[in-house]
Amino acid sequence: MRRIPIVACLIANVCFAARPVIFDTDMGNDIDDALALAMLHALSDRGECELIGVTLTNAHPAAVPYVRMLNRFYGRGVLPVGAAIKALKGGAGDGYMTAALSAAAADSATPAGTAEPAPALLRRLLSNAREKVVIVQTGFSANLAALLESPGGAALATEKVALVVAMAGNFAGGEPEYNVRIDVASAKAVFERWPTPIVFSGFEIGRDLLYPAASIERDFAYAHPHPIAESYRAYAKMPYDRPTWDLTAALEAVRPEHGYFGRSEPGSVLVESNGATRFVPGQGDRRYLRLDPSKRAEILEVLALLSSQPPARR
Ligand SMILES: [Ca+2]
């Protein structure tokens, strides 16, 4: 009896291609991007999505090698990685990347070669996609804004993007959120004019779901060194429980039907000059996530399980 759902799942995976996903990230500024990328590899291994590329909005020189190192750890070393097109003040940090690269040095050499600019990669991935793509944006909006403002970019997004899930904004009335504040002009362009639906995981969602340090110590012990665990330890003094901002966006992007989060009514999102986001219900196809506190334990369990899942293809 226990085999039946597994077989059904395998058949389903063969019969229906997994939804392609692009991960657009400011990797290196905070640790949640690394955990979110680990999750997208795990979900790809499970056949729930297909990670087709990573585009960066952190221009730190370690960002491309670091993402390539993680992709290689998870058995996807050939995955294309696009480099950030501009260094943003306060948004080009190396919170853990160099440390994790040096810890991994014995395990794998850093691949040579430059990366193409992220907006060019985004355009190529979308143009070549056989079905509509979900974009998980967990950093600044520079790449999507560049695509939107390039010739034919809006039409390409309309044709090839199903949905953007963005970790951005603050829908609980707080301060301007970091991902918006660092590049206000790009966020304003994307959140107000991007031609497909956008679902926002606002600051308040990840803030209220803290990743347990105990999981880093326990669940990643299957590999030494483990690049995610090394990164987490390098980012801040252990033990600490870090908000799961980017993980929640990745989860909602791939598993919307699980209903982990509630969603607001549709509306529009306006970006003020200081980076504050304002939701206006009514016209528009923007929504933001809501967290039911009674689901907190379940969601944290899922986030830890997926981000710590051993690579299937290593
Ligand atoms: Ca991020």
Image: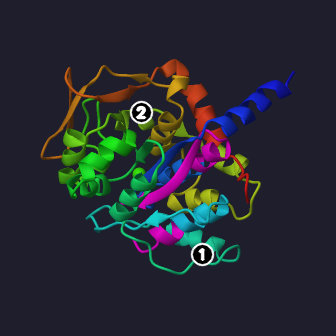
How many numbered discs, if any? 2
Say which amino acid is labelled 2.
Answer: Ile
- Please state, as top left, top right, bottom left or bottom right, where the C terminus lies in the image: bottom right
* Residue 192 in the figure: left or right of residue 255: left
The percent position of residue 32, horizontal first and vertical second, equals 49, 49
The Cα–Cα distance between marks 2 and 1, rounded to whole angstroms, is 33 Å
Q: Relative to 111, is 296 above or below? A: above
* Residue 63 in the figure: left or right of residue 276: right
Q: Residue at x 54, y 57 (%)?
A: 237
Q: Is residue 148 magenta?
A: no
Splitting the image into 4 quarters, where does residue 94 fall?
bottom left
Say which amino acid is labelled 1.
Answer: Ser
Can residue 307 be seen in the rendering of this structure? Answer: no
* Residue under pointer 2: 205
The percent position of residue 308, horizontal first and vertical second, equals 66, 47
Q: Is residue 45 magenta?
A: yes
* Residue 57 in the figure: left or right of residue 300: left
Q: 294 or 1, which lies in front?
A: 1
Q: Residue at x 19, y 45 (%)?
A: 188
Q: Residue at x 51, y 22 (%)?
A: 259
Query: Please, which residue is most extreme toward the left here?
Result: 273
* Residue under pointer 1: 102
Q: 77 or 32, which lies in front?
A: 77
Q: Relative to 154, is 257 above or below? A: above
The percent position of residue 141, horizontal first and vertical second, equals 29, 52
Q: Secondary structure at mark 1?
A: helix
**Which is nearer the N-term, disc 2 or disc 1?**
1
Can residue 111 be seen in the rendering of this structure? Answer: yes
- In the image, the segment drawn in magenta is 39-66
